Image (cartoon, helix red, strand yellow):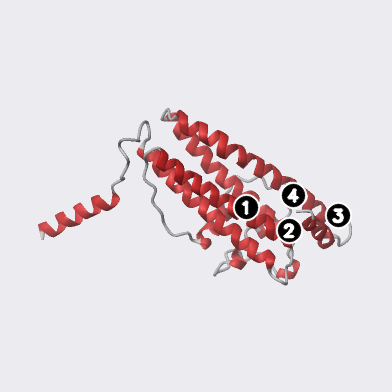
Amino acid sequence: MKSVIFLALVCTSIVSAKEFVATVRQNYENNINDLLVAQIQKELSASYLYQAYASYFQRADVNLPGMKKFFSDASTEEREHAQSLIDYINKRGGHAQYEEVNLMETCKTVRTFTNTDTSGLVDYDKRRMCICGFVATKQINDNCGPREDWKEALMAFEDALAIERFVNSELLDIHKQADAKGDAHLTHILEHEFLEEQVSSINKIAHAITRLRSFAQGAGNNYKLGEYIFDQHL
């Protein structure tokens, strides 16, 4: 019995051991590797989510090709971010590991993320991630109402803002911890290859929300017309 327990412990140790490349690794901490691996998972989850949104806007009963292109491009961009992190881990002699990507869990995580300025966004918390719930296998928000009343482009960009701010927040945390460890190379890479792009994406999406919100709040029922014109220019 003792030998069985011993073998189980040995096997567990082998499975959980981080196989770093000793000839390459320098000033690269275990916990930093863990954070980067977790960030890869978040980038891939964001890519999957954006791909699902692109699929939604391609539906015949939605038919917003500009939005479809925007989210398809966003999905590709997030996959590229994940690949960049994989390349970086290998460059530093780290060990990349992978888990399953779960759309439902991603929807729930973003929906409960609170580091998002929702000032001026009418009923935002009520309609957050409604599209995500629609394209996932289960609904995650009971306050969405009938789809014919949805302001779909606005809702999607509000969701995208929450997603980008969530990813940015996670990157900022990695930067903070890398700086505390004196990992100058990683902080440089994060600042110049990731954080700058995140700030630009957040700004771009915020501009889109402002424009779409003006259609939603304007006099008369002009949102759908404004949404159509907006979509044509994406």
Q: Nearer the viewer, mark 4 or mark 2?
A: 2
Amino acid at the residue labelled 3: Gly
Q: Residues within 10 Å of mark 4 (few under 14, many from 20)?
A: some
Q: Residues within 10 Å of mark 3 (few under 14, many from 20)?
A: few
Sequence order check: which comes first, mark 4 or mark 2?
2
Horizontal side of 52 relative to 183 (left or right) equals right
Residue at point 49% right, 32% down? 187
Amino acid at the residue labelled 1: Ala
> Regarding mark 2 in the picture, which secondary structure is present there?
helix
Q: Depth check: 155 or 77 in front?
A: 77
> Regarding mark 1 in the picture, which secondary structure is present there?
helix
Sequence order check: which comes first, mark 3 or mark 4?
4
The residue wearing badge 1 is 74
Disc number for residue 218: 3
Whether residue 150 is situated above or below residue 233 in the rendered picture = below
Disc number for residue 208: 4
Sequence order check: which comes first, mark 3 or mark 2?
2
Q: CA distance from mark 1 to mark 2?
A: 12 Å
- Quick check: marks 3 and 4 in contact, CB under 8 Å? no
Whether residue 142 is situated above or below residue 6 in the rendered picture = below
Q: CA distance from mark 3 to mark 4?
A: 16 Å
The residue wearing badge 2 is 66
Q: Position of residue 204 (x, y in %)?
A: 70, 45
Q: CA distance from mark 3 to mark 2?
A: 22 Å
Q: Residues within 10 Å of mark 1 (few under 14, many from 20)?
A: many
